[in-house]
Image (tube, rainbow, N blue to C red):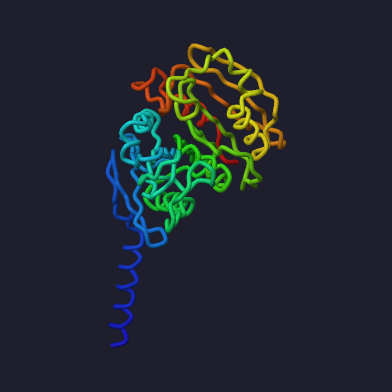
Amino acid sequence: MMKQVIFSTMLVAFFLACKKDQPAQQDYVIGKNRFTTLVNGDEREYYVHVPSTYDGSVAVPVVFMLHGSSGDGLRFYKISGWKEVGEQENIITVYPSSWHYCVIDEGQVKNTTKWNVYPGSFEYCPNQTPRDDIKFLRQIIDELNERFSIDNNRIYLVGFSNGGAMAFRCAVEMSDVFAAIVESAGTLGRDTTLTPAEYIPLTFQIGNRDSRWYGEGITIPMSLFDTLLQFHPQFHGVAKIHSHVFNFETEYTLSGDTTSVMVANYKDSSGQPGREFNFLFIPELGHQYPNGSNHPLYGAQLNWEWLKQFEKP
């Protein structure tokens, strides 16, 4: 009897050991995936594009693309151009959806999607509860690590418009996670005192025909970029807040071309080597994330060429 008990115990142990060594069941497909996750009781969604070259044998970079107001993850999965770059470069790309709210935006009451950014760009209607989007994004990263082999030293984020303002918040509160961040056509519009978790490289980009910034029908001459950076309230304000909050120099060097893109480069002032802030001014670009179809500039490819230089130490 005792021998039978011992044998049965050994058999169970062997079975459990074999089961433990088996890989987790794959719950994703190559290409487009929609996942949901519970955050403080709310079901949140995000899309993930897994490139055809991904096989799990090598840890790959990850890029988050945050949509703007009224958008969602699926829309920017389709139009941002990042899934195509992900295919070319073997990158997992991620497209979260923000939450629907009643907000007061530009003097109007709207029911729309918004990221929970720092106050200043819009107001929530009474009885609205802002969601914890920082917790949401961190939870996505945890779930990515459970499903995929990702390089946690090479996780990046790009945000457009309201997503650009959220990218600014991530640069403060999630700079321990992201290696570099791009804010496109949106950022924090007022100076403030904030303490980033870490200092990381940043880029801000804006078009010279962005109606949300200058008004309908207004085109800012590219030749005025240097003057705008020094004296225009919005341009100077963007440069000032990034220098102030993220420890960049206030002086800059200009490069580029008025027919393609102008770049103001601000060096690190914190003593951290290889870190920079770039302010990009793009001709003939309205309030759009440039994807090669809505504008000649292929933003995802341009941004990736810059982002991939950086990784967490």
Residue drawn at 29 percent across, 51 percent down: 26
Quadrant of the rendered image containing residue 222: top right
Residue 52 horizontal side relative to residue 119, left or right: left
Tell me where residue 294 appears, x and y as whole percent.
35, 22
Q: Quadrant of the N terminus?
A: bottom left
Compared with 66, 233 (above or below) is: above
Tell me where residue 117 appears, x and y as whole percent.
50, 46
Quadrant of the rendered image containing residue 279: top right
Give the number of callouts.
Answer: 0
Quadrant of the rendered image containing residue 269: top right
Residue drawn at 46 percent across, 30 percent down: 212
Q: Nearer the viewer, residue 75 or 17?
A: 75
Q: Nearer the viewer, residue 79 or 201?
A: 79
Compared with 305, 179 (above or below) is: below
Compared with 156, 255 (above or below) is: above
Q: Residue furthest front?
A: 107
Tell me where residue 105 appears, x and y as whole percent.
44, 42
Residue 148 horizontal side relative to residue 118, left or right: left
Q: Residue furthest bottom?
A: 1
Residue 166 horizontal side relative to residue 10, left or right: right
Q: Quadrant of the C terminus?
A: top right
Compared with 115, 80 (above or below) is: above
Residue drawn at 50 percent across, 41 percent down: 121
Tell me where residue 312 appears, x and y as whole percent.
57, 41
